[in-house]
Image (cartoon, rainbow, N blue to C red):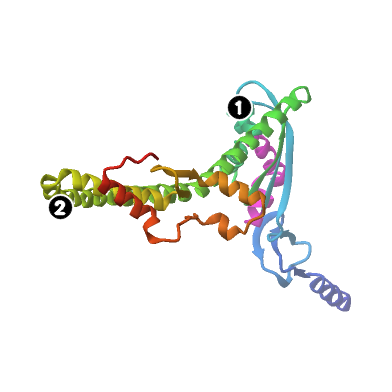
Amino acid sequence: MPIAAALGAIVWGASGFYTIKEAERGVVLRFGELHSIVQPGLNWKPTFVDKVLPVNVEQVKELKTQGAMLTQDENMVKVEMTVQYRVQDPAKYRFSVTNADDSLNQATDSALRYVIGHMTMNDILTTGRAVVRENTWKTLNEIIKPYDMGLDVIDVNFQSARPPEEVKDAFDDAIKAQEDEQRFIREAEAYAREREPIARGDAQRILEEATAYKDRIVLDAKGEVERLQRLLPEFKAAPNLLRERLYIQTMEKVMANTPKIMLDGNNGNNLTVLPLEQIMGKRSESKVQSAVDSTPVLTQPENQSSHPKTILLNRFAKGDSINA
């Protein structure tokens, strides 16, 4: 009898050893009442007295809620949402409510319906998705806080929102139009950023060119005034001579910058001026050298007295008329 009792005590003591995994915590019940929380590793409990409930406190769990919900503008929308959470307090998770996972699921559904009921359908389907997520997360924490279920909500993901099938095509078109609007806005802003520096550069260049043109015109005008002021005494002393001199100088400039051919007439006192463009055109048709085509040609008599400038001066001295 003593041997049997000792053997029984040994078996009873050996049966009390148990192991808690690294990611778990053990909730110890003594005669059905919460006694303590044990940490991972090898532990011992008195068999038939204590009961250990392992709870995983590192696993991230996920629950999903979905359904047709009524919006603020009295439209039905089908939404889906997932919630990620994990156990923060094993004792509260096991005993604060009957089923913490189911309670969290019901709280999520209530929070989502509350948020959807305070938003319009257009906002939910287009630009308000982030708002739905944030508001649902906030409302969910407010709902579960009084129950103290020992859960920590890590994230809330708004999966999808779909309008009823009867109006789905119209809402798809509306969403596509809004996406196109944002794309066009971004393209326009990029184009503006690209063109603005170029326009500013062009404006600065035009201003600088205008300033340079103004300075050049002012300087030219001042130079012309000074030149005329120097010629004024000569004009007062001999007006006719100065007039002829200015005329000859002007003709020199005109003849030097104009592609013309001048010929001295043998039978009269007239100076013949021919258009160089027509003559050059005829020569180009005859395949004359390009150097000759691009250079103004001046035909001169053999003696120096036939030079056009000499002819002009001689005829002015004689008082002859000139026909151009």
Q: In this orientation, which residue lies closer to the viewer: 75 or 87?
A: 75
Q: Which residue is mark 2?
A: 230
Can residue 154 be seen here?
no
CB of mark 2 within 8 Å of CB of mark 1? no
Can residue 235 be seen here?
yes
Mark 1: secondary structure: loop
Quadrant for the C terminus in the image: top left
The amino acid at mark 1 is Thr
Residue sitting at the far bottom = 3
Residue 120 - label = 1
| Of labels 2 and 1, the one closer to you | 2
The amino acid at mark 2 is Arg
Q: Position of residue 67 (x, y in %)?
A: 74, 32
To which quarter of the image does residue 302 belong? bottom left
To which quarter of the image does residue 89 belong? bottom right
Q: In this orientation, which residue lies closer to the viewer: 68 or 191?
A: 191
The answer to whether 24 is drawn above or below residue 294 in the figure is below
Q: Is residue 88 magenta?
A: yes
To which quarter of the image does residue 165 belong? top right
Q: Main secondary structure of the magenta part?
A: helix
Q: Is residue 15 magenta?
A: no
Q: Position of residue 136 (x, y in %)?
A: 60, 39
Mark 2: secondary structure: helix
Quadrant for the N terminus in the image: bottom right
In the image, the segment drawn in magenta is 86-112
- Left or right: 170, with 126 as reference point: right
